[in-house]
Amino acid sequence: MNLKNYERYFLFNHSIIILVLLITFILYYAFNSFVSKYLSFQCVFNDSNKIEVFVSKKDYKLLCQNSSLYIDQKKYAYKFENISKLSLNGKKYYSVQLSLLKDTNYQVGDISTIHVFMKKEKLIDIFKIIWKDDLDGKT
């Protein structure tokens, strides 16, 4: 059985076309998708719906910009109750008491981590950072 010239490279040609389409799809996804970045804080529960957080001035502005936070992967809306300034080692910190609009299962004195939305970042920018770190580490 003799194969003609175009039949001989059929599998090779089609695998290259599929590979090019796959790479195109991955690059399109990387350039057009976003990843959300969150900032984490430790907090202390003063009540089932009141928490206290110590933050820097920059993080305080971030808290003011957002209207919700995440505790144990559940979204909670909040409002400010009491804000006081502290000075430690020459840096200004804020003690912020937040009142959650829904009750939680936490008791007084429990310590938890809250997450606040910071920004969305393109997936390709994350790849560029990883690529740059890999190149810097090898040289």
Image: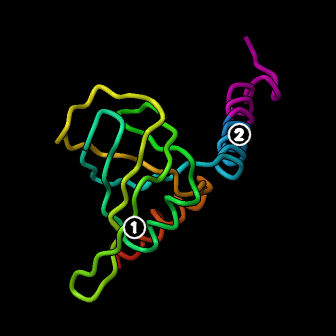
14 part of magenta stretch: yes
| Sequence-earlier tag: 1 or 2 | 2
Looking at the image, residue 12 lies above or below residue 132: above
Measured as percent of width and height from the top left, residue 126 is found at 52, 59
Residue 134 coordinates in the image, percent (x, y):
39, 67
Q: According to the image, label 1 marks what residue? A: 134
Give the residue drawn at x 34%, y 80%: 92
Magenta span: predominant SS is: helix
Q: Residue furthest front?
A: 82
Q: Position of residue 17 (x, y in %)?
A: 75, 35
Q: CA distance from mark 1 to mark 2?
A: 24 Å
For the rendered model, the colour scheme is rainbow
Callout 1: SS: helix
Q: Secondary structure at mark 2?
A: helix
Q: On screen, 106 above or below 57?
A: above
The quadrant in which residue 96 appears is bottom left
**Magenta highlight on residue 3:** yes
Q: Is residue 109 left or right of residue 137?
A: left
Q: What residue lies at 68% left-to-right and 43% top-to-bottom?
A: 29
Q: Look at 40% across and 49% down and name the residue there.
A: 98
Q: Where are the magenta residues, as a range?
A: 1-18
- Nearer to us in this view, 51 or 2: 51
Q: Quadrant of the N terminus?
A: top right
Instruction: Name the amino acid type tagged 1.
Output: Asp
Furthest residue in direction top, as rendered: 1
Q: In the depicted view, which residue is nearer to us: 117 or 85?
A: 85
1 or 79, which lies in front?
79
